[in-house]
Amino acid sequence: MAQTKKRDVSIVERRLKSGQVFSAGSKPIPLIDPEQWEVRIVNSQIHDTHLWSMQADKGWVYLAPEDLAVSPNEIGFRVQDGRVVRGTHGQEVLMKMPKSDYRAIQKAKDAQNRQNTFGKKQVKAAIVGAAGQAEGSQSAEFLDAQLNQVRIVDTRERVPLDPNEN
């Protein structure tokens, strides 16, 4: 059986075919167990205590080199002081959190954001304020009295990011 030679595709050619000509996009970090961990690249130079805060206040831990499915060099990182880092001084550090914890935190943050943004009081105040500015205080007073009976329902739906995804 004759072997066919694999054709080398240039980076530019691959980028043009990908449909992402403006950005190469971020690459996923290949993990041995990707279902277990949420991974984040943390810039330690945001402030002096940023890495400490990520651990003590937010629950992230350093990703171990053994968690990677490839060598750190293959994805542009290196091991420094037992941490997987990149940057001239190792200022960008890979950190991880169990996905179940990450999802719970995201769900709680989403609920709080929705309450702060779409809570009954906030929506009512926005409507009454807009009516007052556009139509005067009489219409704002009328709406203020009437909106006590309004029920606001918030829903979510899945929106595919990939146009080919159904």
Image (cartoon, rainbow, N blue to C red):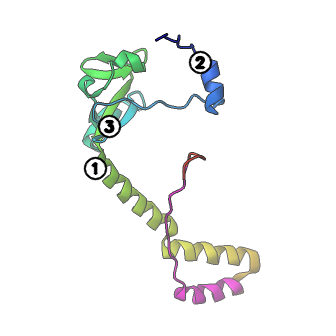
Q: Which residue is mark 1?
A: 100
Res. 87 image quadrant: top left
**Residue at 57% across, 14% down:** 7
- CA separation in Å, label 3 and label 2: 26 Å
Could you say which quadrant of the image residue 139 lies in?
A: bottom right
Q: Are marks 3 and 1 in contact (CB under 8 Å)?
A: no
Whole-percent x, y for residue 42 in the image: 39, 32
Asked if the magenta segment contains residue 155, the reply would be yes
Q: Mark 2 = which residue?
A: 11
Front position in the image: 90 or 104: 104
**Residue 41 rendering spot, x and y as whole percentages:** 40, 31
Distance between mark 3 and mark 1 Cα atoms: 12 Å
Residue situated furthest right in the rendering = 135
Q: Residue at x 25, y 41 (%)?
A: 56
Q: The residue tagged with tag 3: helix, strand or loop?
A: loop
Closer to the camera: disc 2 or disc 1? Answer: 2
Does any portion of residue 53 appear in the rendered image? Answer: no
| Horizontal side, residue 158 vs residue 103: left or right | right
Residue 34 place in picture, x, y as percent: 32, 37
**Dot 3 or dot 1, earlier in sequence:** 3
Which region of the structure is painted magenta?
Answer: 139-160
